[in-house]
Amino acid sequence: MPDPSRGISRLIKRAFALFSIYLIFISFLPLISDVMGAGRWNGYGWGAYDFNNGVLDVRFSDLTYGGDKPKLSASPYPLMFQSKYVDVIEVSDHESFINGNNMYYDFQVARIIITDEETITYIYVANVSGEGLIVSKTTSIPFQDAIVIVYSAPREVHFRISLWRWYYESVNNITFESFGQASEKRLENAENATFTFFDREFGRFHAIVFFSRPVNMTICRDDKGINKFIVEARSQNLTFTIHVYVAENRKISPLTAFFRTLLSIKALHFLLPPLTTICVYLGWKKWVRRLE
């Protein structure tokens, strides 16, 4: 007569084996997501998208928030799956206007189109009576260290786009100290904007924004520092090309940065599958084999 205990033991072993396979499969998902999502636009909320290529992180916030449209951050050290990024610059819909209409309050996003892995387009429609204006904002990452933002309208319009950071160290060699008592500095027919900023951990960064046409630029400050510059132009199209350069006077070594990456959340995604496999093995050895 068959021993019932042996049948129960076999069922437990099969159940443990199936559950172990499931756990190991699940442990690979974060790593697969990192690998498959690198270098392409990935949705993470209502109209929110993120692009990460290991050097730059470009993020569009949720449609309910007027800032970060997009926000550009850069890795101080271009290590794969780096989790530490320094904020570089933010394009604000909340403080930007087209023909005097606010891009956050007076427009609504009608469509979001991902044309390829590196390019995303937001279609804005003015909800102001009688305006009937449709504007597109296309963001692409054609190079590893640069992004391109293109505003397009069906006719000539007045663009007034605000680019923020807390805080700029300088913009076109204008520093906080050079303002004196003024709260704004205006530059006519600017072809680019070169800015620097200082990060306490990683040192000084510098970047440059090239404009597709000469623009009028207003550099603004608050009580603490330079926090934005506003770009104005009358045109049908306006393009910003933003290049980010590595930090100067870095305060940590590349070796330290490497070990910090190993301890980051994304690095743990590499460790999760082997750790899960070890736990499954120990569970089999310490518990299931006792059933034999």
Image: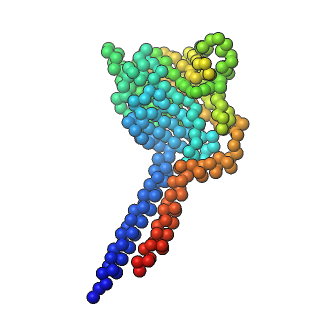
- In the image, is 249 to the left or to the right of 9? right
Residue at left 40%, top 62%? Answer: 22
Up the image or down, 234 lies above or below 254; here it is above
Residue 251 percent across, percent down from the top left: 70, 40
Up the image or down, 38 lies above or below 112; here it is below
Which residue occupies the foreground of this view, 9 or 206?
9
Name the colouring of the figure.
rainbow
Residue 248 percent across, percent down from the top left: 70, 36
**Which residue lies most toward the left here?**
1
Residue at left 61%, top 18%? Answer: 223
Up the image or down, 161 lies above or below 281; here it is above
Residue at left 59%, top 36%? Answer: 86
Residue at left 45%, top 18%? Answer: 97
Where's the C terminus, which quadrant? bottom left
Up the image or down, 104 lies above or below 182; here it is below
Report whether residue 119 is seen. Answer: yes
- In the image, is 51 to the left or to the right of 258? left
**Which residue lies most toward the right here?**
249
Residue 244 percent across, percent down from the top left: 61, 34
Which residue occupies the foreground of this view, 260 or 184?
260
- In the image, is 70 to the left or to the right of 227? left
Which residue occupies the foreground of this view, 47 or 2?
2
- In which image quadrant can residue 196 be found? top right
